[in-house]
Amino acid sequence: MIRTTADEALLALARMVMDASVRSADDLGGLSPVQLRALTALGAAGSANLGSLADEMGGTVSTASRLVDRLITAGWVDRAPSRRNGREISLSLTDAGRSLLRTYDDHRLLQLRNRLER
């Protein structure tokens, strides 16, 4: 595939965004990309069951379950019985989880603004 100037610009932008994301995760204590993806997905959905979170992340329910256990232990996610279906659990961000995502986004914006100014 022959890359155009526009392709190279898109790749440079992708690298800049990835760098800002990695640096911001490191600034917050080394959150993993998978943890951040799960938190972001739950933040966007408001709440989700384990199956829908696994689907959103492209993984299995058992993998999502282990991840959610770690996020609950960290205090970023809450698990409660679903109001719609008594056999399901509902996952949502805690106040600490929402605060963490806001801080992460603020760090990323700062990183991106600094890079663009250079």
Image (tube, rainbow, N blue to C red):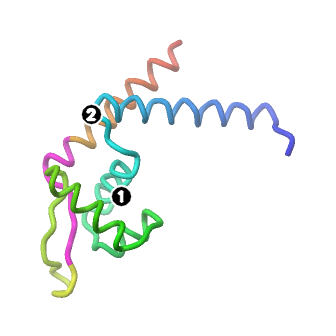
What whole-number distance in Å separates the C-alpha atoms at marks 1 and 2? 20 Å
Residue 98 percent location from the top left of the image: 21, 47
User: Residue 81: within the magenta?
Assistant: no
Give the structural element (helix, strand or loop) at label 2. loop
Q: Nearer the viewer, residue 23 or 8?
A: 23
User: Residue 91: within the magenta?
Assistant: yes
> In this rendering, would 37 be left or right of 81?
right
> In this rendering, would 3 be left or right of 23?
right
The residue that mark 2 highlights is: 29
Outermost residue, top side: 118
Image disc number at residue 41: 1
Image disc number at residue 31: none
Q: Quadrant of residue 5?
A: top right
Classed neighbour count for the residue bearing mark 2: other residues with Cα under 10 Å, few (<14), some (14–19), many (≥20): few
User: Which segment did they paint magenta?
Assistant: 89-99
Asked if residue 70 is positioned above or below residue 84 in the image, the reply reads: above
